[in-house]
Image: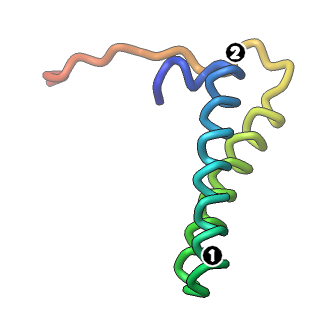
Amino acid sequence: MFNWLNTKRGLLLCSVLILALAGIEVYSFLQTHKTMYLGFAAFLLALAVSAWVQVYRHRGDPSWPPKRVLVPRDHK
């Protein structure tokens, strides 16, 4: 996960972009009546909702988000 996504501002920006894409998919469905657009819009909405549920579950937890740990590539 990218560092900027670990902030609420980054998650909000990403959610707005995902919701805009979902809106475009719903508009495409209304124009063409092809079910694949509706399925993709539902998938995008599920992504945004799951991210915000994760943020809600960890509210007030000072150890969230977990810190990145550097792991060497050749960890023999």
* Residue nearest the observer in this picture, 61 or 48: 48
Residue 30's image quarter?
A: bottom right
The reply to whether dot 2 and dot 1 touch (C-beta < 8 Å) is no
Residue for point 84% across, 25% down: 59
Q: Amino acid at mark 1?
A: Leu
Residue 66 place in picture, x, y as percent: 59, 20
Left or right placement of residue 59 versus residue 72 in this view:
right
At a point 68% along the width and 42% down the height, the residue shown is 51
Q: Percent position (x, y) of residue 27?
A: 65, 68
Q: Which residue is mark 1?
A: 38
Mark 1 lies on a secondary structure that is: helix
Q: Is residue 36 found left or right of 59 in the rendered image?
A: left
Earlier-in-chain disc, 2 versus 1: 1
Q: Is residue 58 above or below residue 16?
A: above
Please report the residue visible at 13 percent of the width from the left and 22 percent of the height from the top. Answer: 74
- Disc ID at residue 63: 2
How many angstroms separate mark 2 from mark 1 (CA)? 37 Å
Name the image colouring.
Answer: rainbow
Instruction: Classify mark 2: residues with Cα within 10 Å, few (<14), some (14-19) or many (20+).
Output: few
Q: Please provide percent x and percent y for residue 13.
A: 64, 30
In the rendered view, does 35 fall on the left or right side of 50? left
In the image: residue 43, left or right of residue 61:
left
Label 1 Cα neighbours within 10 Å, binned few <14 / some 14-19 / many ≥20? some
Q: Amino acid at mark 2?
A: Ser
| The image quarter in which residue 43 lies | bottom right
Considering depth in this image, is 21 or 64 the residue closer to the camera? Answer: 21
Q: Position of residue 65 (x, y in %)?
A: 64, 21
